[in-house]
Amino acid sequence: MNSFDHFTPATLTEALSILAERNGNASIIAGGTDLLLRVKNHIVKPAAVLNVKRVPELRALSFDSNEGLRVGALTTLRDLTRSPLIRDCYPVLASAAGLMASEQIRSLATLGGNLCNASPSADLAPPLIALDAVACLVSLSSERQIPLAEFFTGPGRSVLQKGELLKEIIVPPPQGKTAYLKHSPRAFMDIAIVGAAVRIQQQGGKCQQARIVLGAVAPTPLRVRSGEESLEGQTLTSEVIRQAAKISAESCSPISDVRSAAWYRKRMVEVLVRRGIEATL
Ligand SMILES: Cc1cc2nc3c(=O)[nH]c(=O)nc-3n(C[C@H](O)[C@H](O)[C@H](O)COP(=O)(O)OP(=O)(O)OC[C@H]3O[C@@H](n4cnc5c(N)ncnc54)[C@H](O)[C@@H]3O)c2cc1C
């Protein structure tokens, strides 16, 4: 491993000042479960590492019935699985986090790290996008909010600018029911070859609003608007559900790799979207 400068700021301003001084050329580390592997494998060679674990402003976890949920970037996957607030108001986030890695990794790994690593298979991205979550990005000179659906720009890439970090995620008050289903070759300790999040809000026996978001089948998480539109305004019969699942499979162009063939990923999209919609009824 190469040597690097190491900083442990105690406040957000201190962290952002270091990022600005280094002209953004410092790698942020939270849980380190993604970054350290890449450093050890010489995929990244940081000149400086900024450990943000002690920054209290990144630890928000609060809920307001009008504003919704504020969840800080440093919230661990374990926190997500155990927090009574998350389990009561946004159970899909607790269950998605529970499908990830192992208890040991979940104790270290953070929400912010999972999103900023921007892996196409990141398990927290599809359910958060389905919940219409917003990312709050801060730098020394600015603070901006963008829909999480617009955060990812490619594998390992996001809209984060030099000098910026993810402070927190804001999730609107819960509307309807949300499910996240993940398919991976092994039942535990494996990343998704397909992930599918579905949110359905019904009124008067009809689907008022739908969200379908896929993971691991495109360079970034993929929102399937045509599938959503096929559900909205409809009574969710098995035929309508099957059609939305078929549209979802047709909307993605996954790659074949060592983990799965493209055709199998598409087939699993159809299965998971159908089951996801059924799980919300
Ligand atoms: C054995 C194992 C199993 C795993 N299983 C899964 C799985 O099932 N599903 C899954 O999705 N992932 C999985 N992962 C990947 C990883 O654990 C998660 O992505 C985790 O949430 C990363 O969080 P972290 O805090 O450890 O990130 P770190 O490694 O600390 O950071 C990851 C990246 O995000 C950046 N970053 C971190 N925080 C911020 C911030 N606040 N602002 C800006 N940039 C930031 C870092 O600079 C780095 O580039 C697994 C990893 C391992 C080792």
Image: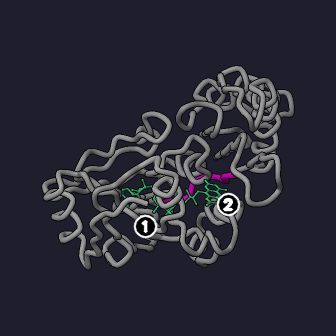
Residue in the image at 57% along x and 40% along y: 120
Give the image location of residue 81, x and y in percent: 64, 71
**How many residues crowd mark 1 within 10 Å: few (<14), some (14–19), many (20+)?**
many
- Tell me if label 1 and label 2 are in contact, CB under 8 Å: no
Visible residue check, residue 200: no
Residue in the image at 44% along x and 73% along y: 61
**Residue 43 or residue 130, whichever sits in front:** 43
**Residue type, label 1:** Ala
Tag 1 residue = 30
Q: Main secondary structure of the magenta part?
A: loop
Visible residue check, residue 266: yes
What is the span of residues highlighted in magenta in the rendered image? 172-179
Q: Quadrant of residue 71?
A: bottom left
Quarter the N terminus occupies: bottom left
Disc 2 within 8 angstroms of ligand 1 (CB) = yes
Disc 1 within 8 angstroms of ligand 1 (CB) = yes
Give the image location of residue 3, x and y in percent: 34, 63
Residue in the image at 58% along x and 75% along y: 107
178 inside magenta stretch: yes
Mark 1 or 2, closer to the camera: 1
Number of numbered discs visible in the structure rendering: 2
Under tag 2, what secondary structure? loop
Q: Which mark is residue 100?
A: 2
**Residue type, label 2:** Met
